[in-house]
Amino acid sequence: MGGSEQKFVNQAFETNWIAPLGPNVNGFENDIESYVGADKHHVAALSSGTASIHIALELLGVSKGDEVLCQSFTFSASANPILYLGATPVFIDSEKDTWNMSPELLEIAIKDRLEKNIKPKAIVAVHLYGMPYKAKEINEIARKYDIPVVEDSAEALGSTYFNQSCGTLSDIGIFSFNGNKIITTSGGGALVTTDVKLKEKAVFLSTQARDDAPHYEHSNVGYNYRMSNVLAGIGRGQMEVLDDRVAARRSVYNFYKENLSKFNSISFLEEPEGCFSNRWITCIKTKSFEQREQIRLALLKEDIESRPLWKPMHMQPVFKESLSFTNGTSEHLFDVGLCLPSGSNLSQNDLNRILNVITNIPKL
Ligand SMILES: *Cc1c(COP(=O)(O)O)cnc(C)c1O
């Protein structure tokens, strides 16, 4: 926590706004709006990033039987809402510069589906680990075939692409404020759009879709997805320290990069032109699966947790029936990649301890 979260939470208690609405919800939305790009964007604070993707897909008209093109190299929450809506995911592999959705494969997939007389209803692209995806190329293809893009920015609050905030690069963006993200409300999310009507519809759907009447009248299926005013208070405090958190994560990345680059077997994901990553997690690529395991197990022996990169969705048992367009990139990353400890609160001592363990591995 940064310091003023408690003040906003106390305000919620003192004013008795213990509900999924109230001054902190509006205040948090305004804070995010000004952070991501002034007056152009409208934000709806929701209960999670997953809920935000669910609502975003519904707003784009995704329903039973539709196909949605989704980045394969991601966390399962990017894809699960496609199934909540009764639609079918089609997975797209990554390119090597950002580890995110390959524009080339995206177009191949779209052409393939169109040939079979299926028009994909939406694209879910992800700024994984905070690194912006190739939005120019993806948007160009999306426009060419007239398919809307949901921008999964759950890991990329504070990242920018040619000076524009991640979350605002497509038709609808989403953020997550889960406990593991760069800032947190303990659990929470947000939907971002330039269309105020879409924001209003998102709020309507996420508060049980109640029509305008003195009694409870419903002509739509609603959800209970709005953010609580108590948690939004945490969010308002966290927004004050977001830039500090980004700076801290980037300095963790720089520490690892400066000290581990001398090993030929370890490489880092650089920022391509125009990309500014919040460096939510520092990931390394090693030479082989065996070497990745050697580093992971050496750290584990010292009680330091590290993790393999996300296992691609097209390799997951739950999605084994799904169609995918692959090129080997994400499978290779899953094999040889490792997430290093990257918390904003790591001390210099912690970092030195981690570095020591890695540098003492023989024949690295
Ligand atoms: C965390 C995460 C989500 C889901 O957000 P929640 O707030 O945990 O529901 C979605 N996509 C990605 C890439 C994430 O990392």
Image (cartoon, rainbow, N blue to C red):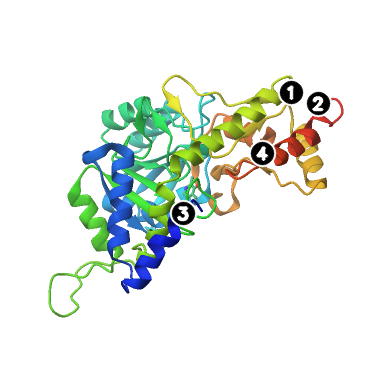
Q: Is residue 328 visible?
A: no
Secondary structure type for disc 3: helix
Residue at 52 percent across and 50 percent down: it is 76
Q: Residue furthest bottom?
A: 215
- Mark before the other along the chain sequence, 2 or 3: 3
Where residue 157 sits in the image (x, y, percent)?
Answer: 43, 41
Measured Cα–Cα span from mark 2 to mark 3? 38 Å
Badge 2: residue crowd in 10 Å (few <14, some 14–19, many ≥20): some
Secondary structure type for disc 2: loop
Mark 2 or 3: the one toward you:
2
Where residue 81 sits in the image (x, y, percent)?
Answer: 42, 55
Residue at the spot of label 4 = 340
Measured Cα–Cα span from mark 1 to mark 3? 35 Å
Residue at the spot of label 2 = 364
Quadrant in the picture for the C terminus:
top right
Mark 1 and 2 residues: CB-CB less than 8 Å, in contact? yes
Secondary structure type for disc 1: loop
Give the camera-side residue of 38 and 145: 38
Label 3 lies in ligand 1 vicinity (Cβ under 8 Å): no
